[in-house]
Each structure stands twice: as C-alpha cells, then as structure tokens.
C-alpha cells in the first residue's frame, strides 16, 4: 500500500530544510527513472509482477511531485525542474499549436494501422488505412473520438508525458515484430517524431488508449 500525497509531504518533506526537501524530490525522480527503465527494457522481469506494479508506483510518485511543487511554492522556494519535467512542459505547451498527428503501428506478420488526425476548429478528423490486414466491421464503421473535442484530446495527451519520451526505441535482438511511429506536425511547419522497433516507451499502451487504438499482442 502506498502513501497518499499529503502523507508523503508530512512524512518526507514537511519541516525539512530546502536542500533536504530537494533531495527527497531528486530521490523520487531517481526511482521514477529506474522504474521506467524496467518497464521499457525488462517487461518480463519479476518486478513487473509485484504489487504495487511499476505503473502504479510511477503514477503515485508523480502525485508526490505535484504535492512537493505546491509545498515549495507555498514556502516561497524555487522548484527546480528536472530535464524530464522541462522537456515535458515544452512539449505540452506546444500541443496547442498542433496541426496533425500521424500514427503508424504494426508489423509484417500482424498487420497494422496508419492513422492521421487533423483538426477543423475543435472537430477531430480521422483518416485510417489498414496495412496487411482486413479491418473488422466494427473498425470500419467505428466513430473515433465521439463527443470529444480537440482540446479534450490534447489534455489527455498531456497526461501521457510524451515530452519525456526518447526519439527512438529499439530491441536489437528482434528482427521482425512491431514498428511504430508518432509524428506531431505544428502550424509553423515544424515536427516532433517518436518511433521504435519492438521496444516502446513505458506508457505506450496508455497512449494507445488515448488514441483509441488496439494494442497488438
């Protein structure tokens, strides 16, 4: 069982000096980095089977960090962003200027999908094509992002923390398998691309959930 954010502040930060409180925050980030590495590079490890599982821990530790930021602000202390937090903030701030999102996900043996999202004001326009497989009738006629606005979708993407993702993920031990890419195109003509081959960011399946795409087993 993990502590709530208030209990974390009371037990680990409250009453400490600024430097000691900073070390607690740094320790949280050190553990988040370790857990992300486990999820990305050792998805079949024993640690992935122990409760609370790494995704739960990471989510809880992010709640701790949010509480720590509030605590620092209340005391007039500077909260120094880590390189991950700075990159994530920059990415999320840019989402308001996104023009389109292009997703390619699949493989030679399992087929896949190429999907492009564009926007007409708050309306989300979807164009999908299926590669090396015939889509089911449900897929063919499904209305994606029903009742969802552009701002609502982008808000969900902010919670994925994609700004922390690396540009490229690869498992060099697998020749075939699954390749994927996600490209954000912005109004100023610039792009931001993430991609991989048989390896994924720790929360890639959370991203697929937001994008309403089926995970390939």
Image (cartoon, grey):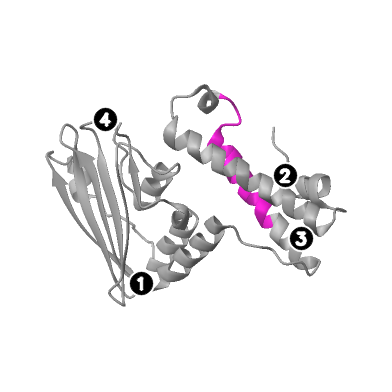
Q: Is residue 53 left or right of residue 76?
A: left
Please give the name of the residue rendered at 12% of the width and 39% of the height, measured from the top-left corner: 134
Q: Are marks 2 and 3 in contact (CB under 8 Å)?
A: no
Q: Earlier in the sequence, mark 4 or mark 2?
A: 2
In this rendering, which labeled residue sits more in front, label 1 or label 3? Answer: 3
Q: Quadrant of residue 109?
A: top left
Q: Residues within 10 Å of mark 3 (few under 14, many from 20)?
A: some
Front-lying residue, 62 or 150: 62
**Does residue 132 show up magenta in the picture?**
no
Q: Which residues are drawn in magenta?
A: 50-66
Q: Earlier in the sequence, mark 1 or mark 3?
A: 3
Q: Earlier in the sequence, mark 1 or mark 4?
A: 1
Q: Secondary structure at mark 3?
A: helix
Q: Quadrant of residue 121?
A: bottom left
Q: Which residue is mark 4?
A: 174
Image location of residue 198, percent across then percent down? 30, 36
In this rendering, which labeled residue sits more in front, label 4 or label 2? Answer: 4
Q: Which residue is mark 1?
A: 122
Quadrant housing the N terminus:
top right
Q: Are marks 1 and 2 in contact (CB under 8 Å)?
A: no
Residue 4's disc is 2
């Amino acid at each position: 069982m993990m502590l709530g954010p208030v209990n974390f502040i009371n037990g680990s930060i409250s009453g400490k000096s600024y430097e000691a409180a900073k070390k607690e925050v740094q320790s949280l980030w050190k553990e988040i980095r370790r857990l992300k590495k486990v999820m990305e590079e050792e998805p079949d490890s024993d640690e992935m089977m122990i409760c609370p599982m790494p995704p739960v821990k990471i989510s809880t530790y992010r709640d701790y960090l949010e509480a720590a930021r509030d605590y620092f602000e209340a005391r007039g202390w500077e909260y120094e962003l880590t390189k991950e937090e700075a990159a994530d903030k920059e990415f999320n701030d840019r989402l308001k200027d996104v023009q389109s999102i292009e997703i390619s996900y699949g493989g030679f043996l399992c087929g896949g999908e190429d999907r492009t999202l564009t926007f007409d004001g708050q309306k989300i326009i979807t164009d999908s094509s299926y590669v090396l497989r015939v889509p089911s009738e449900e897929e063919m006629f499904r209305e994606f992002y029903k009742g969802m606005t552009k701002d609502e979708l982008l808000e969900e993407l902010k919670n994925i923390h994609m700004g922390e993702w690396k540009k490229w993920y690869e498992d060099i031990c697998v020749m075939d398998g699954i390749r994927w890419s996600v490209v954000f195109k912005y109004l100023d003509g610039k792009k931001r691309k993430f991609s991989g081959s048989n390896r994924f960011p720790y929360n890639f399946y959370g991203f697929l959930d937001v994008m309403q795409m089926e995970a390939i087993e």
